[in-house]
Amino acid sequence: MDGGAGAPQTGGAAGQLTDRQRTLAFLTVLIAFVLEVADTTIVNTALPEIRRALDASSAAMQWIVAGYLLVLGALLLLGGRLGDAFGYRRMFLIGVGGFVATSALCGLAQTPEQLVIGRLLQGAAGAMMGPQVMAIVQTLFSPLERVARLAWFGVIGGLAAILGPVLGGLLIEWNGFGLGWRLIFLVNLPIGLIALWLGMRTIPHRDTGGQLQIDLLGAALFAVGFAALLFALIDGSERGWPAWAIPCALVGVALVIAGWMRALARRRAGLAAIIEPALFRLTTFRWGLVAMLAFSAGAAGFLLVLAIALQQGLGKSPLDTALAHMPFGLGVMAGISLIGKKYLPRFGRWLLIGGALVMITGASGALTLIAGGTGGGAGFFALLAVAGIGMGMVAGPLPPVVVADVDRAFAGTASATLRTAQQLGGAIGIAVIGSAYLATVARPGAFVAGLSVAGATFVTLLLIAIVAAGRLPKDIFGVRRGH
């Protein structure tokens, strides 16, 4: 094993809990996770109704979606470090309470500006809550136990992402109490309050070890840096890459580098830092993050191009497009629950490499059929299912691989760093693959060429993920093949 952050610990509060108590605590954080994932997708269905009801502009609509993701991605590192310093249970409860309160603000908004502010605050609450979810799982279970537990996040997360838009449509159609679109936010209140009540009763306290320092300047450098980078990627790609986008991204990168250098200097001086440089001396963490960044970029870009190509290229309706995603979503859940959870301890990095190759095969085949004018039929849906299985074989196992060797004292920071890589990778994929596709298809008769460019970019990103996965240790969890 590598040195630095050390091997996972098994003592502390987790060792004093019964299996039933650990299961209840796990279910509690799983509920909070569903809230966060569903709130990312449920709003998409309500955008036309929100626009009509609040007379919102196109820019406001964009920020209702992007603002949440921007603040979430920018503050994840701070949220993770706060969990390490003040306890995961405390920060989880604060995050859930904040998520409930900001959901109420969104549901009661009277103007587009109020709704955008509510979504920004909701993203901040999610950044406080999100890192604690995986950190709590990490403190409750051993590395091998985490494989099965974290697989549930993939299954439930995939299901929540698929059903989010459906639930949003049903709530708006129901129009309970005449609230219309507001129900998609207000439904978080009873669910969040249940999670809050369960959290206070089931999640164990954790001794912070007296390390209660937070490097506020370092936190600001990373937060502003990631915000600038994500803003350039999200807003810049939406506006056709205006002149300010590249300088904004470069400023963001420079601030992140400055934050990293500050963290190195502070740790050498024995002071607290917003990120733990020792984590990056762990092979599983370092190369796992690279794989996660590249894989998230490829997956997000592919899904964006798939949705646009089916509608604008083949003339599919939004409903038909949503239904076309069902085989992919079911494949993801199968890849996580039936393959990843069972075979990761045995095959380790080879499962990740195989999953990426399977996804390349299915996704490339589906894009090829779309380029030929076919966006339906058994063959197309089968290829999407194959692509989903490949994605599940990577997306489910990769998080427990990344944190396999992380000391539980750094669980919050490690979880937040992983989540930041996922957010940043998704933004990069949407910007790079989406822009490559849209820039090409803007020319008359270039639909096939656009899909080819997007497909080549997607394959390149997944090959980077494969190379990174190949640098992982052969025996990640200490279980030899065949045992």
Image (spheres, grey):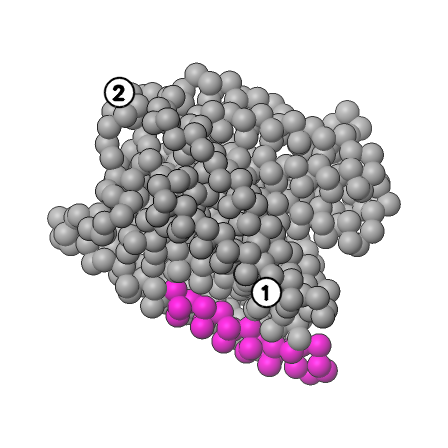
Pick the front one: 389 or 67:
67
Q: Quadrant of residue 281?
A: bottom left
Residue 16 circle label: 2
Identified by mark 1, the residue type is Leu
Which residue is rendered at x = 32% and y = 62% of the image?
Answer: 469
Q: Which residues are magenta?
A: 440-465
Q: Residue furthest front?
A: 269
Q: How many marks?
A: 2
Identify the residue at image location x=60%, y=61%. Answer: 251
- Give the residue drawn at x 47%, y 25%: 90
Which SS type dominates the magenta stretch? helix
- According to the picture, the residue beneath numbered tag 1 turns out to be 250
- Kindly state the secondary structure of the residue where label 1 is placed: helix
Position of residue 75 measured from the top left corner of the image (x, y, whole percent)? 55, 43
- 380 and 99: which one is in front? 99
On the rendered structure, is 258 left or right of 181?
A: left
Q: Is residue 398 left or right of residue 222?
A: left
Q: Bin the neighbour count of mark 2 within 10 Å (Cα to Cα): few under 14, some 14-19, many 20 and up.
A: few
Amino acid type assigned to the residue bearing label 2 in the image: Gln
Q: Position of residue 30 (x, y in %)?
A: 45, 33
Q: Residue at x 42, y 67 (%)?
A: 462
Question: How far, Cα to Cα, is label 1 from label 2?
Answer: 48 Å
Q: Position of residue 106 (x, y in %)?
A: 72, 34
Q: Check residue 186 for magenta coloring.
A: no
